[in-house]
Image (cartoon, rainbow, N blue to C red):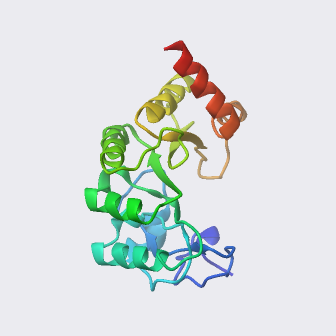
Amino acid sequence: MGGPAFNIPGGNFTPGMYLKKGYVITSRGCNNACWFCKVPDRENGLHELPIQNGWNVVDDNFLGCSENHIRAVFEMLKTQPQKPIFTGGLEARLLQPWHVDVLRESKVERMYFAYDTPEDFEPLIHAGKLLRDGGIKNTSGSRAKCYVLIGYPGDSMEQAEKRLIDTWRAGFFPYAMLFRNENGETNEDWRQFQRLWVRPQIVYSKLKNLALAQ
């Protein structure tokens, strides 16, 4: 027994152990120090792992890895039976044109970014522009998505809804990610709000109505 669920460093990744086939972890940890995240302390920084086979990359901060590691992961992805998915979350601040090139060349199916703090917004706008300029179109919202943190201390539902809409305008399909306190607890009112911004059909309908109203 151990691992992230017990706030213990994860160690190397073994395909098929705890995660279903296709999921792969090529690095653990993160060099950031976000106030709401336990990953950096738990993993003691960012560590690149031996690369195993898989097509759904769920690293804590994949773009924080070295260029050699990232390119090696994309070489591995070329050998997989399905198009790549990056559900671990990509940090917009770290996105560079060469990242966009390998994402486009790999025909990535879906990629998820994160909008956790106010400082993340300008990098998110820039990342959206890099993706568009690099030939990754997202008109249907099916490829570039973004987790938006909501419900943290001092947040309001009006502010949260604005961030979610701004995320869509930056070129990403938004998903509300609800803040949990140290005990893992959430607020019922915020849970109800999140449900309106996490189910794709409801979110698509909201964004469609917003577009018609503009």
User: What is the count of numbered marks?
Assistant: 0
- Residue furthest out toward the top: 213
Q: Residue 158 in the image: state x and y as whole percent.
A: 53, 22
Q: Residue 24 in the image: state x and y as whole percent.
A: 56, 74
Horizontal placement of 209 versus 100: left or right? right
At horizontal 39% and vertical 64% (from top left) the residue drawn is: 105
Horizontal placement of 162 versus 104: left or right? right
97 in relation to 56, above or below? above
Residue 196 can be seen in this image: no
Give the quadrant of residue 56.
bottom right
Residue 108 can be seen in this image: yes
Q: Residue 54 in the image: state x and y as whole percent.
A: 56, 76
At horizontal 52% and vertical 76% (from top left) the residue drawn is: 9
5 in relation to 133, above or below? below
At horizontal 53% and vertical 58% (from top left) the residue drawn is: 109
Q: Residue 144 in the image: state x and y as whole percent.
A: 48, 48
Give the quadrant of residue 63.
bottom left
| Residue nearer the viewer, 130 or 112 | 130
At horizontal 59% and vertical 52% (from top left) the residue drawn is: 182
| Residue nearer the viewer, 134 or 147 | 134
4 in relation to 94, above or below? below
Quadrant of the image for the N terminus?
Answer: bottom right
